[in-house]
Image: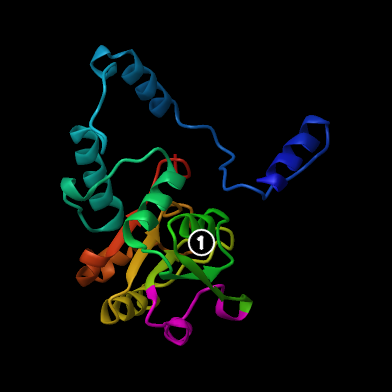
């Protein structure tokens, strides 16, 4: 965020800058989304406290969206609406991680992940990736890093900041490995529609149905919309 702030300051000073500091699309939020938000604010039915986990009608819409875009459908009871992506990520770790549990974290990674793991009492175990692997972690790396304290894997595809997109076979292999060893998967899929050059996003929940009881999928509106 410091890089992003610096880029914006230079732009304000008249410099020509292309900023790569934040995952922020360069297009405006579509008019129909803005208009729907304004209409919702004006609707007096929304001027009251709502259920802590989110409105039922909203959860139903999220289930529809997930089925349409990710090829699997969560039950409404499995959906939790949070105050943005960071809240969702932290809530996932706070739910799964006990003190001193290890969380496997492929690098490079979004800066929020290790802080959320630490705040939840866990220990980030960083797994480096590079250009040779396409910035994708392998099952062999995961297995080499696994210990009796390994509780979860932070899995991100498409990735921030590298843009790496895992093919379906690699995602399925990682999912099956996690199931075999009873390891939770926190799957951040917020960049699901920001894919290019013929790549395709696949949800680990759709590819590995048996992971359902040990997988939390994080998503949000901030990137695609």
The location of residue 71, given as percent across then percent down, is 25, 58
Image quadrant occupied by the C terminus? top left
Q: Secondary structure at mark 1?
A: loop
Q: Is residue 63 left or right of residue 198?
A: left
The location of residue 119, given as percent across then percent down, is 48, 54
Image: 192 above or below 154: above
Image: 43 above or below 115: above
Report the residue at 39% width, 26% height from top.
32
Report the residue at 72% width, 47% height from top.
3
Determine if the magenta segment contains residue 65.
Answer: no
Quadrant of the image occupied by residue 166: bottom left
Report the residue at 42% width, 85% height from top.
143
Q: Is residue 13 left or right of residue 178?
A: right
**Segment tinted magenta in the rendering:** 132-150
Image: 71 above or below 8: below
The location of residue 106, given as percent across then percent down, is 52, 70
Quadrant of the image occupied by residue 150: bottom left
The colour scheme used here is: rainbow
User: Callout 1: 10 Å neighbours few (<14), some, many (20+)?
Assistant: many
The residue beneath circle 1 is 159
Image: 216 above or below 63: below
- In front here: 89 or 37? 89
């Amino acid at each position: 965020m410091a890089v992003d702030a610096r880029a914006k300051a230079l732009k304000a000073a008249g410099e020509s800058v292309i900023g790569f500091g934040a995952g922020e699309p360069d297009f405006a939020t579509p008019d129909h989304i803005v208009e729907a938000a304004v209409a919702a604010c004006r609707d007096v039915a929304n001027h009251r406290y709502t259920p802590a986990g989110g409105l039922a009608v909203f959860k139903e819409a999220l289930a529809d969206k997930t089925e349409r875009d990710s090829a699997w459908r969560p039950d409404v009871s499995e959906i939790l609406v949070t105050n943005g992506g960071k809240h969702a990520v932290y809530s996932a770790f706070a739910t799964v991680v006990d003190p001193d549990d290890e969380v496997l974290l492929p690098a490079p990674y979004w800066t929020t992940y290790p802080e959320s793991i630490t705040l939840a009492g866990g220990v980030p175990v960083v797994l480096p990736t590079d250009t040779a692997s396409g910035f994708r972690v392998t099952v062999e790396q995961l297995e080499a890093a696994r210990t009796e304290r390994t509780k979860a894997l932070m899995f991100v595809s498409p990735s921030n900041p590298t843009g790496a997109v895992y093919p379906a076979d690699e995602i399925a292999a990682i999912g099956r490995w996690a199931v075999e060893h009873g390891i939770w998967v926190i799957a951040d899929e917020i960049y699901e529609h920001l894919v290019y050059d013929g790549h395709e996003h696949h949800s680990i929940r759709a590819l590995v149905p048996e992971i359902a009881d040990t997988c939390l999928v994080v998503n949000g509106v901030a990137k695609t919309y």
